[in-house]
Image (spheres, rainbow, N blue to C red):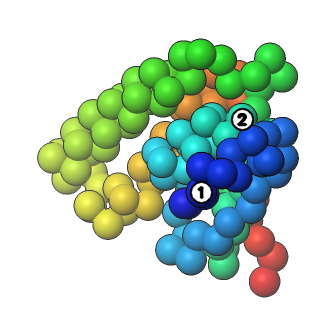
């Protein structure tokens, strides 16, 4: 998700929704953008799921990006082990990684993260 720097002040406290045609949850860059913009909520919509990441009541906090990096390291360490042991394929891991990253990040900073399956 690319947002011009000039829009940063305007988007504070808003809900930003964007498209994820590949179906994955938020990328690391998506989450960093939500923190930098101080968004109230970030949403991503795919054919199957809608993902929502809502800012903690007390705000993102000054260590949010550090917590994201810790969650990223943790998720990819686990995923690498699962791939190496043959439990999951790289393709499955790619789909799982973003969802796990968002879940763990939200838990670390007190944000709300939801994945809702769309009815078809």
Sequence-wise, which precedes: disc 1 or disc 2?
A: 1
Circle 2 crowding by C-alpha within 10 Å: few under 14, some 14–19, many from 20: many
Q: Is residue 70 above or below residue 34?
A: above
Q: Residue 115: x, y in percent?
A: 70, 53
| The quadrant where residue 18 appears | bottom right
Give me the residue at 60% from left, 57% from top.
3
Identify the secondary structure beneath mark 2. loop
Q: Residue 119: x, y in percent?
A: 81, 76
Q: Is residue 2 above or below residue 80?
A: below
Identify the secondary structure beneath mark 1. loop
User: How many numbered badges does the structure rendering display?
Assistant: 2
* Residue 69 visible to an observer of this rendering: yes
| The quadrant where residue 76 appears | top left
Question: Pointer 1 and pointer 2: residues touching (CB < 8 Å)?
Answer: no
Position of the N terminus, as image quadrant, is: bottom right
Report the side of 65 relative to 59 (left or right). Answer: left
Q: Which residue is nearer to you in this view: 21 or 103?
A: 21
The residue that label 1 is drawn on is: 4
Report the side of 10 relative to 28 (left or right). Answer: right
Q: Is residue 9 above or below residue 22?
A: above
The residue that label 2 is drawn on is: 38
Give me the residue at 58% from left, 70% from top.
20
Report the side of 42 relative to 27 (left or right). Answer: right
Q: Which residue is nearer to you in this view: 57 or 108?
A: 57
Looking at the image, which residue sits at the far left? 84
Q: Residue 25: x, y in percent?
A: 56, 56
Give me the residue at 78% from left, 83% from top.
120
């Amino acid at each position: 998700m690319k947002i011009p720097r000039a829009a940063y002040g305007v988007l504070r406290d808003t809900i930003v929704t964007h498209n994820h045609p590949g179906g994955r949850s938020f990328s690391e860059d998506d989450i960093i953008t939500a923190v930098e913009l101080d968004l109230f909520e970030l949403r991503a919509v795919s054919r199957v799921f809608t993902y929502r990441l809502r800012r903690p009541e007390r705000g993102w906090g000054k260590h949010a990006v550090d917590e994201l990096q810790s969650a990223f390291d943790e998720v990819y360490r686990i995923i690498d082990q699962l791939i190496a042991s043959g439990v999951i394929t790289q393709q499955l891991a790619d789909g799982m990684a973003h969802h796990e990253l968002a879940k763990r990040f939200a838990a670390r900073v007190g944000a709300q993260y939801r994945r809702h399956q769309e009815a078809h």
